[in-house]
Amino acid sequence: MSERISREKLVKIYNIEITFFDELVDNGLLNVETENETRYLIYEDLHVFEKFANWHYDLEINLPGLEVIHNMLKKIDDLNQKNRELMNKLSAISDRYEDI
């Protein structure tokens, strides 16, 4: 089993509203494990939670804004990956023509 932290501990440690955490989960922005009706966040996803909490509480971005930002950043990451793949293919093609 992965290391994890309960929703209740997160709320206490980060001084956030429990409804904020639940809204992140309900909108698919956080993945949690549930055991005995207790929600747990996997430590590997803690940085994602912290990012959303900082955006929401420090920058006052509402939940729909968090969703938009999250989706745009995901698309940017996907495009960057695709760009790297295309550059690698272009480099391989270029190397072949240099040998001719």
Image: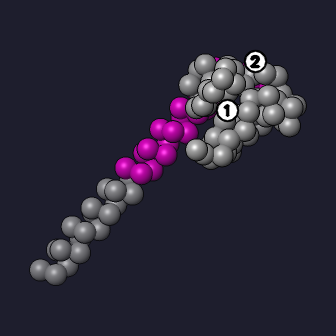
Identify residue type, mark 1. Answer: Tyr
Disc 2 residue crowd, few under 14, some 14–19, many 20+, Cα 10 Å = few
Nearest the eye: 40 or 94: 40
Asked if one can make out residue 63 in the rendered structure from this viewpoint, the answer is no
Judge whether 65 appears above or below 42 on screen.
above
Q: Amino acid at mark 2?
A: Thr
Residue 69 is a magenta residue? yes
Tell me where residue 21 appears, x and y as whole percent: 72, 25
For image coordinates 32% across by 63% down, the residue present is: 88
Q: Nearer the viewer, mark 2 or mark 1?
A: 1
Q: Which residue is mark 2?
A: 19
Extent of the magenta region:
59-82
Instruction: Indicate whether residue 12 is drawn in magenta.
Output: no
Residue position for label 1:
40
Q: Secondary structure at mark 1?
A: strand
What residue is drawn where x is 42% and y is 45%?
A: 79
Tell me where residue 62 sits by quadrant: top right
Report the residue that reaches farthest toward the front: 36
Q: Between 74 and 49, which is closer to the camera in this rendering?
A: 49
Quadrant of the rendering where the N terminus is positioned: top right
For the residue labelled by badge 2, is the local secondary structure a helix, a strand or a loop?
helix
Measure the C-alpha gap from mark 2 to mark 1.
15 Å
**In-image side of 1 versus 90 (left or right):** right
For the stretch drawn in magenta, the main secondary structure is helix
Q: Identify the residue at the far bottom of this view.
A: 99
Q: Quadrant of the C terminus?
A: bottom left
Give x and y (percent) for residue 69: 61, 32
Q: Is residue 93 above or below residue 33?
A: below
Sequence-first tag of 2 and 1: 2
